[in-house]
Amino acid sequence: METAVNSPVTLTEGAIEEIKRLMSEPNFAGGFLRVGVKGGGCSGMSYVLGFDQKEEGDTEYEISGIPVIMKDAHGIYLHGIEVDFQKGLNARGFIFNNPNASSTCGCGTSFAV
């Protein structure tokens, strides 16, 4: 397991604020923020975002004081991705802006490359 200097993923100020809020909750179990992908979703692949423990094949990053982990194999799909958090009336939650996606679904949680 290695710690990389430059993260392939960026978090907006809104995402950083929300993640730090979640980490400060009394029931936060600890761990790292995992950013990844998995097969499935209406466009072929879905994003993974949640708190997890490090595993073999993970690289660790730090983004604005937030410990982030990502499977090395997911870098090809996530390089350059921006994670944002929206609080609007029409949508609330994390949004993924992926410059590598050739298509995305209407809800923005799955993509194709």
Image (cartoon, grey):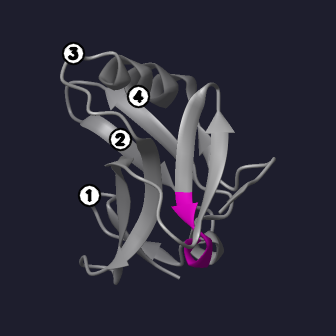
Q: CA distance from mark 3 to mark 4?
A: 14 Å
Give SS at disc 4. Answer: helix
Q: Position of residue 99 (x, y in %)?
A: 62, 63
Q: Position of residue 95 (x, y in %)?
A: 40, 45
Q: Position of residue 21 (x, y in %)?
A: 35, 17
In the rendered view, tell whether residue 77 sits above or below residue 24.
below
Give SS at disc 3. Answer: loop
Instruction: Name the amino acid, label 2.
Output: Phe
Which quarter of the rendered picture does the N terminus lie within?
bottom right
Q: CA distance from mark 2 to mark 1?
A: 11 Å
- Residue position marked by numbered label 3 in the rendering: 26
- Residue position marked by numbered label 2 in the rendering: 94
- At horizontal 60% and vertical 55% (from top left) the residue drawn is 81
Task: State the extent of the magenta-drawn residues as a range.
Answer: 70-74
- At horizontal 71% and vertical 50% (from top left) the residue drawn is 7
84 vs 62, nearest the viewer: 62
User: Which mark is in front, 2 or 1?
Assistant: 2
Q: Position of residue 5 (x, y in %)?
A: 81, 47
106 vs 81, nearest the viewer: 81
- Residue position marked by numbered label 1 in the rendering: 107
45 vs 7, nearest the viewer: 7
User: Which mark is in front, 2 or 3?
Assistant: 3
In the rendered view, tell whether residue 110 sits above or below residue 102.
above
- Marks 1 and 3, the one that precedes in the sequence: 3
- Marks 3 and 4, the one that precedes in the sequence: 4
- Residue position marked by numbered label 4 in the rendering: 19
Left or right: 108 in relation to 28? right
- At horizontal 26% and vertical 58% (from top left) the residue drawn is 107
Q: Is residue 45 magenta?
A: no
User: Which mark is in front, 1 or 3?
Assistant: 3
- Marks 2 and 1, the one that precedes in the sequence: 2
Q: CA distance from mark 2 to mark 3?
A: 21 Å
